[in-house]
Image: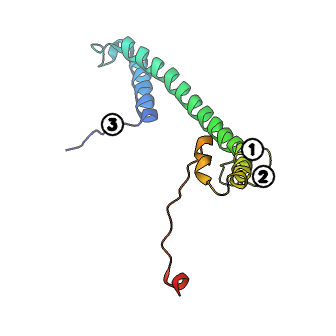
Amino acid sequence: MSRIVIKKSIPIVIDLGKNIIIKHKADGDKSPLKNVDMKDLESKIDTVVIAYDKAQRLRREAEELTEMVYQSLGIHKNQRTTEPGDAMYYITQCRDILKGIYRGSLRKLGEWGFQVDDTTKKKTEEENS
C-alpha cells in the first residue's frame, strides 16, 4: 500500500498548500475538496508566507548585525588584538597599562572588571629539574 508523506519543512508545506489551492480553484465546482474551508487554508498560507519571508529577512539581518558586532569588538575569527580601532585593541591596551601600574597586586585589575586568575600552575618535571 502506498504512503503519502507530508514533509514538515516550511517551504515544502507552503508550496503544497499553494498547489492544493491552485488545483482546487482550477477544478471549480468539480473539486473533491468542496467541504474543506479552502478560504481559511488560503488565508493561513498567505499569513505564513508573509511571516516566513519576514523571518528570513530578520535572520539575514541578525547575521549581518552579529558579524558587525564581532568585527567592532575585534573578536572576529580573522582579527587580532593588535589591530587598532576595535574594542579589543583598546581593552588589551587598558589591561597592559593596568598590569604595569599594579604589577605587584594584579588582583586590583578585578576592580576594573578584568577576571584575574592568580592560581599557580603546577611545574612540569622539566621545570623542577
The disc label shown at residue 129, or none: none
Secondary structure state at the residue bearing disc 1: loop
Secondary structure state at the residue bearing disc 3: loop
> What is the C-alpha distance between the residues marked 2 and 1?
7 Å
**CB-based contact (under 8 Å), mark 2 and mark 1:** yes
Confirm whether residue 93 shows in the render.
yes
Amino acid type indicated by mark 1: Asp
Residue located 44% across and 22% down the image: 22
* Mark whose residue sits in front, 3 or 1: 1
Residue located 44% across and 28% down the image: 14
Residue 120 higher or lower than 18, as above or below = below
Residue located 40% across and 31% down the image: 13
How far across and down, in percent of the image, does residue 75 sit? 65, 49
Q: Nearer the viewer, residue 107 or 28?
A: 107
Q: Disc 3 marks which residue?
A: 6
Q: Disc 2 marks which residue?
A: 83
Secondary structure state at the residue bearing disc 2: loop
Amino acid type indicated by mark 2: Glu
Residue 91 higher or lower than 100, as above or below = above
Q: Disc 1 marks which residue?
A: 86
Q: On the rendered structure, is 86 left or right of 67?
A: right
> What is the C-alpha distance between the residues marked 3 and 2?
52 Å
Residue located farthest toward the right when viewing the structure as drawn? 84
Amino acid type indicated by mark 3: Ile
How far across and down, in percent of the image, does residue 24 sit? 38, 19
Residue located 56% across and 49% down the image: 115
Q: Quadrant of the N terminus?
A: top left
